[in-house]
Image (spheres, grey):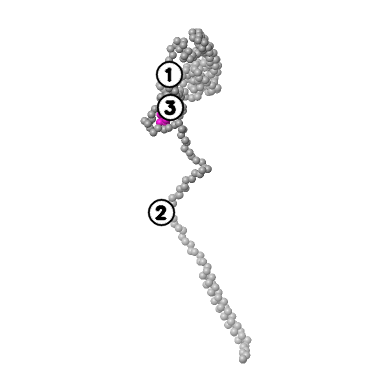
Amino acid sequence: MPIVTTSKRGRSQVASRKSKIFVIAAVAIAAIVAVYLGARVTRPRQPQPPEVPDTTAKPATPKVPDAPVATEMGPKVLEPEPPTNIVVAATTNDYVKKPGQMMLPNGTILTFPPPKEGETTKVLANGRIYECDSEGNWRDTTKRKLFDNAFESNFANLAIEGRSFIPAFLVGLDPDAVMKTLKKDYVLKGDETEEELAEINAFVEMKGVALDYIEQGGTFDEFVTEMASFVQAERKIRANSLKQVMLLYKDGKIEEAKTKAESLNAMLAEEGYKPIKLPIHVRRAFGEEVDE
């Protein structure tokens, strides 16, 4: 094989051509890689204009939550059980009167142990007191409020015979307010019973006594204290007098008991005390006419 030799200039030209070839190849490879990578890179999104709300659309209806379900351990609202002795009639016309039963004005029927024939029993219902007989008849015997406040009620107890009052509830009050109450007139309703009228008259008379006491220089507190002592002494002497008369009556000494009662009542009147109150059967034995 022949040996080919080149000069220095020829070798330089060959090296230059090789170098150009390498540069062209490198540029081609770089272009291919750039195209490949550009295909995989996500281009940034173009900015979108803001959405304009639709004013014609109706707002969504809020969902109503379901009612809570009561559990066995949770609190419960229970209807009260009606009393076993009360029955409600359909109408008033359906009611048939019978012993041991009564219909109230509101249609409620009350049952109770009937009283014996010829006797009556008291039934308490809805804050009222009813008197019922053995045939099913009844009447409202509830005492109505005759006085306006606690002061007048307690003062009336001081005036009405047989009542008890508490002096501490009447003393230490405003003198001007007390005087205003004492001077106030009592206006009747017009349908008072005889018993109610007696209590009202005793109340008004006692107010007059208190005013007289105050006008003579005393105070209302002193009047209450004096009346408390007076009432206590009166009750004691009247109780002792009644005991003397009843002992004679029980021994069968009717005339002697009658005479004793008359003399004791005269003595009580002199002291300013009320006469003794004898039982109906004793007054009949003395020959007095007594209304039932």
At label 3, the amino acid type is Gly
Query: Which residue is the site of mark 3?
Result: 100
Q: Is residue 204 visible?
A: no
Residue depth check, mark 1 versus mark 3: number of the one nearer the observer: 3
- Judge whether residue 105 is colored magenta: yes
**Quadrant where the C terminus is found in the figure:** top left
Residue for badge 1: 194
Q: Position of residue 22 (x, y in %)?
A: 58, 79
Q: Residue 256's x, y, as percent?
A: 50, 8
SS of the residue under disc 1: helix
Mark 2 neighbour class, 10 Å CA radius: few under 14, some 14 to 19, many 20 or more: few
Disc 3: CA contacts within 10 A as few (<14), some (14-19) or many (>=20): some
Marks 1/3: CA distance?
Answer: 30 Å
Residue name at image x 51 percent, y 44 percent = 71
Give yes or no for contact between labels 1 and 3 (Cβ–Cβ under 8 Å).
no
Nearest to the eye among marks 2 and 3: give it: 3
Q: State the residue lying farthest toward the left.
A: 93
| Residue 217 in the image, given as x and y percentages of width and height | 53, 16
